[in-house]
């Protein structure tokens, strides 16, 4: 029996008390056994609010919290009880909270946002500042911190598990690198990654708030842990380089997948950038929300209660953009549904890919057969990797390249016997692949898909402006019309290889008897109808690009301006410009006087751009904005109306492809071996992988400074051993600088 049952304690713990009791203190605890505390029902005392305007209390949930820290979640210490909200209704947590550096910073931000004079006294003169300055370290300790931060950053940037941090630290120790004895564990790695992310987000907040406008991009998916996640990006203009930037903000686990849950997730992500509903409105200072870009799901664009409609309730001027990459995919999908043979064709292609992907033996045999035909073997990947139009194009090209080898191997597989199930599959695939119908559709799609795949790749780039989209769509529609009237490259190859008299395709593939009778695909109703349906659905899906106000933006496409610098150019687009600025989207962006002045500014801009029209749209308008900034710097003028309009154009986001790439990166981090990764760890590592610089460009010193200035407690990397007083001097103690 244990002696602990009789009141004995282990060595060194006799006088220790539980942490919660220690933090609470001895106030009003008059009974040694704690009976008083157990019986007493604590209540929030209103006098605690005296001289504490930040302290708030929710009577329904019986929690007190700091309203200032909750308003600035990036700056606040999320681990602090008062930031989260606490039911520990004691004065001690309040006193602890108001002495933290994070609360001090949030208090200053609150004063600044409310228009109050922020005290300009040095932080070193405050009680809080004195506590921070005590956190000194030697050059040796600074070097240890740099090694630790650099290693943690490298682990996060490469999407590696945090356990790799321990392994690298073991290597460093073996190489006789001085890394101290502290933080050499998983929690230490998480700590450094957390502070690196905080510092990077603080820089991002500053950069975004210098931009006049911003757009929201959001998409949802289910991760490997079977959790519904909403990933949020923002698009803004980097006012130094004058280019649009799309950057990851956060990934939030959904509490519910309805529009209210998605909106709350988006607002939660934006809160990390110190934005809320009020700060996104057009009648407030700071960047104005001008665009919300989602996929076409009803939860996002439902006419009554979709996410976009809910955003319009507090930002009426915002425009909604259905992601153009998704639009194109949906248009092709709609057209394929009307082509009756397409489902059979796709099932056959997927079946063939799966038949080889899951069998190393079959892949090895297929490669050997390819070498006999003097063909380079093309990898037949997992069919789950075939999603976008570009990947479908690559899959069909791989099949055509291996076609002779695939047909020969399938025939060999069912003729040699073996497992009945495999033999039957091989025979079924062989029968379908060698049919004239399948081969004709295969070669037709190799002419058809590249046209759409090229447009899909364009739509997945971030450099394009919203008014360029209709031009790219028009080009694709013209190419599809041309395909209706003349054979493409691959269809000509099909006709050359086809020998109907001998029922052969090429020199090795014997055709099945069933299939098309005609060689000219233009006489086949199914393929002709597929082209017509695709053209029709693409026009329908992109019809809003040809409607006002988006169609009015085409006046900024200088590739379509009249040639020369005469009257036609001067008058071009004037009526459309006035109609554009009269729309709701600009009512709080441009004043009435600015709307009257913009015509003159537009004419001057056209004259300036007229000799630059051989360059790209984004490059030229970026150059124009830099020129305007330089001119304003000389005479101190405010931003012109035309500058605001061009910046608005830069900010409107056409595509959410960044969100798709973000989910791909998320799957690298949260793979099947890390399904229980915490939300915070996923958020921080994803932020560094997506937004962080390369390892050689990462400066640990800046993050260490931020950690020293904002952390609670004293960072240490050399254990608790104290230095001799005689060894201390002003030369070997310093606050880390940005090295």
Image: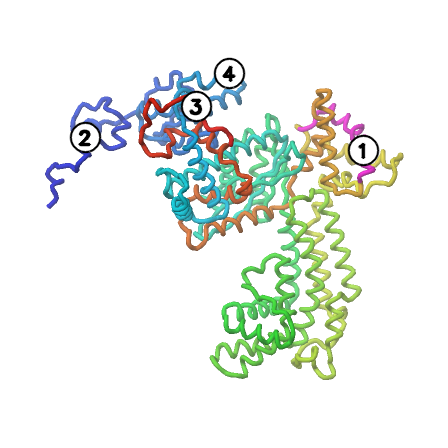
**CA gap, disc 2 and disc 3:** 41 Å
Quick check: is 672 in the magenta stretch? no
Depicted 459 relative to depicted 364: above or below: above
Q: Is disc 4 in contact with disc 3, using a CB cutoff of under 8 Å?
A: no
Q: Which residue is mark 3?
A: 731
Q: Which residue is mark 2?
A: 15
Compare marks 1 and 3 and give the one earlier in the sequence: 1
Bounds of the magenta segment: 589-612
**CA gap, disc 1 and disc 3:** 57 Å
Q: Left of 733 or right of it: where is 219?
A: right
**CA gap, disc 4 and disc 1:** 45 Å
Depicted 655 relative to depicted 357: above or below: above
Compare marks 4 and 3 and give the one earlier in the sequence: 4
Residue at screen point 32% across, 21% down: 45
Q: Which residue is mark 4?
A: 120
**CA gap, disc 2 and disc 1:** 81 Å
Q: Is disc 2 in contact with disc 4, using a CB cutoff of under 8 Å?
A: no
Tag 3, which secondary structure?
Answer: helix
Compare marks 2 and 3 and give the one earlier in the sequence: 2
Q: Which residue is mark 1?
A: 608
| Extreme residue toward the right, this view | 566
């Amino acid at each position: 029996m244990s002696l602990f049952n009789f009141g004995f304690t282990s060595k060194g713990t006799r006088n220790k008390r539980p942490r919660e009791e220690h933090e609470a203190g001895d106030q009003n605890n008059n009974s040694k056994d704690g009976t008083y505390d157990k019986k007493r029902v604590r209540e929030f005392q209103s006098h605690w609010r005296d001289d504490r305007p930040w302290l708030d209390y929710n009577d329904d949930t019986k929690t007190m919290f700091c309203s200032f820290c909750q308003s600035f979640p990036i700056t606040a210490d999320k681990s602090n009880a008062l930031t989260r909200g606490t039911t520990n209704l004691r004065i001690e947590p309040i006193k602890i909270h108001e002495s933290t550096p994070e609360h001090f910073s949030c208090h200053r931000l609150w004063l600044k946002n409310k228009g109050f004079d922020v005290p300009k006294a040095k932080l070193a003169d405050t009680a809080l500042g004195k506590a921070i300055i005590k956190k000194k370290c030697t050059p040796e300790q600074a070097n240890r911190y740099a090694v630790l931060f650099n290693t943690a950053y490298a682990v996060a940037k490469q999407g590696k598990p945090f356990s790799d941090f321990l392994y690298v630290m073991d290597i460093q120790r073996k190489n006789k690198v001085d890394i101290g004895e502290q933080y050499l564990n998983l929690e230490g790695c998480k700590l450094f990654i957390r502070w690196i992310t905080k510092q990077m987000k603080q820089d991002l907040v500053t950069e975004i708030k210098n931009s006049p406008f911003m757009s929201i991009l959001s998409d949802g998916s289910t991760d490997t842990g079977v959790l519904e996640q909403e990933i949020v990006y923002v698009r803004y203009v980097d006012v130094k380089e004058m280019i649009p930037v799309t950057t990851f903000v956060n990934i939030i686990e959904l509490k519910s997948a309805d529009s209210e849950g998605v909106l709350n997730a988006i607002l939660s992500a934006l809160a990390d950038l110190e934005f809320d509903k009020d700060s996104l409105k057009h009648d407030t200072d700071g960047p104005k929300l001008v665009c919300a870009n989602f996929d076409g799901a009803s939860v996002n664009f439902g006419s009554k209660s979709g996410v976009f409609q809910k955003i319009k309730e507090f930002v009426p001027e915002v425009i909604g953009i259905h992601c153009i990459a998704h639009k194109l995919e949906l248009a092709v999908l709609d057209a394929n549904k009307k082509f009756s043979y397409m489902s059979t064709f796709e099932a056959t292609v997927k079946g063939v890919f799966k038949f080889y992907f899951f069998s190393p033996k079959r892949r090895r045999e297929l490669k050997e057969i390819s070498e006999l035909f003097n063909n380079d073997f093309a990898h037949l990947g997992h069919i789950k990797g075939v999603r976008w139009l570009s990947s479908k194009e690559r899959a069909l090209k791989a099949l055509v390249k291996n076609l002779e080898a695939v047909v020969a191997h399938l025939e060999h597989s069912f003729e040699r016997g073996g497992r009945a199930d495999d033999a039957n599959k091989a025979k079924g695939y062989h029968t379908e692949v060698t049919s004239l119908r399948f081969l004709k559709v295969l070669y037709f799609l190799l002419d058809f898909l590249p046209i759409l795949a090229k447009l899909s790749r364009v739509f997945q780039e971030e450099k394009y402006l919203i008014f360029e989209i209709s031009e790219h769509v028009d080009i694709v529609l013209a190419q599809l019309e041309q395909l209706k009237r003349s054979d493409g490259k691959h269809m000509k190859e099909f006709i050359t290889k086809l020998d109907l008299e001998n029922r052969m395709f090429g020199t090795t593939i014997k055709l099945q008897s069933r299939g098309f009778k005609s060689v000219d695909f233009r006489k086949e109703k199914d393929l002709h109808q597929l082209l017509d349906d695709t053209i029709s659905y693409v026009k329908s899906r992109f019809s809003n690009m040809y409607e006002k106000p988006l169609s009015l933006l085409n006046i900024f496409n200088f590739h379509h301006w009249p040639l020369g610098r005469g009257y036609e150019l001067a008058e071009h687009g004037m009526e459309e410009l006035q109609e554009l600025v009269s729309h709701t989207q600009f009512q709080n962006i441009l004043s009435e006087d600015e709307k009257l002045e913009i015509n003159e500014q537009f004419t001057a801009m056209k004259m300036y751009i007229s000799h630059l029209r051989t360059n790209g749209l984004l490059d030229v308008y970026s150059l124009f904005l830099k020129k305007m900034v330089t001119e304003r710097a000389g005479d101190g003028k405010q931003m012109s109306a035309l500058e605001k309009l061009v910046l608005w154009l830069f900010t409107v986001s056409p595509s959410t492809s960044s969100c798709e790439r973000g989910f791909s990166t998320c799957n690298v981090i949260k793979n099947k071996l890390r399904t229980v990764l915490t939300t915070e760890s996923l958020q921080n590592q994803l932020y560094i992988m997506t937004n962080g610089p390369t390892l050689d460009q990462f400066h640990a010193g800046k993050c260490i400074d931020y950690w020293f200035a904002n952390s609670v407690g004293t960072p240490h990397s050399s254990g608790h051993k104290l230095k001799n007083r005689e060894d201390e001097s002003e030369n070997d103690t310093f606050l880390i600088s940005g090295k």
